[in-house]
Image: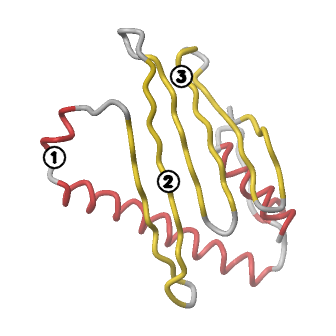
Amino acid sequence: GFEVTERTPRGFAGRWGEASNATFANTLRFEAPCVLRNDKEYVDKDGNKNYSSALFLCCPSGQGKSMLIVRFGSTQFNSRFALIPDWVIHQTSNTVFEQDMGFLSSQNEILLRKKVPTKDLYLNLKSCDTWVTEYRRWLDKVG
C-alpha cells in the first residue's frame, strides 16, 4: 500500500512498493495546486539500478478547464516503444486523461453543490487506490 511520509497544507508525499519485489521502490509527491511527481527505482536482471519518473503539471485554461502537461523519463529505454508512433501514444494517453477529467469534473460539481467532505460523500473501498484516498483526505483538511 501507499505509506504517507509527509503531510503539509501544500500537499503530501509517500512511497509504495511491491511486496513480492524488494528491488522496486516508488515515491510520489503531490504539491498544490497541481504538481504530481512519481519516481520509480528498480534493479534489473543484471543488477543495475534504473530510474523512471513521470511529472504531471496542471495549468488553468478557462473556467472549469485545465491543460495537463505530462513528461516521462527513464534511464532504461525499451526498444519496443520505438516501434510505436508518437501520435498513437499521445492519442491513447489523451483518451485516458479525458475520461479521468470528465469523472473528476462531475465529482467536483457534486462536492460544491452538496458542501460536504469527500469522506461523507464517497465510500473508499479497501481495494481503492490508496493515493486517491490520501488526496481526498488532504483535500478535506485544507479545503
Above/below status of 108 relative to 95: below
Amino acid under label 3?
Answer: Phe
Q: Residue furthest top?
A: 46
Say whether disc 1 or disc 2 marks the residue closer to the N-terminus.
2
**Cα distance in 3D space between marks 1 and 2:** 21 Å
Q: Describe residue 31's horizontal placement relative to residue 55 as left or right.
A: right
Q: Describe residue 18's horizontal placement relative to residue 141 as left or right.
A: left
* Contact flag, marks 3 and 2 (Cβ < 8 Å): no
Q: Nearer the viewer, mark 3 or mark 2?
A: 2
Q: Residue furthest bottom?
A: 63
Label 2 belongs to which residue? 55
Q: Which label number is shown at residue 24? A: 3
Q: Describe residue 112's horizontal placement relative to residue 40 as left or right.
A: right
Residue displayed at 50% across by 58% down: 56
Q: Residues within 10 Å of mark 2 (few under 14, many from 20)?
A: some
Residue displayed at 34% across by 63% down: 95
Residue 118 in picture, x, y percent from top left: 78, 64
Q: Nearer the viewer, mark 1 or mark 2?
A: 2
Q: Secondary structure at mark 2?
A: strand
Label 1 belongs to which residue? 84
Residue displayed at 83% across by 79% down: 115
- The quadrant the N terminus occupies is top right
For residue 43, what is the image quadrant? top left
**Front residue of this view, candidates 50 and 5:** 50
**Cα distance in 3D space between marks 3 and 1:** 26 Å
**Front residue of this view, candidates 116 and 65:** 65
**Front residue of this view, candidates 49 and 106:** 49
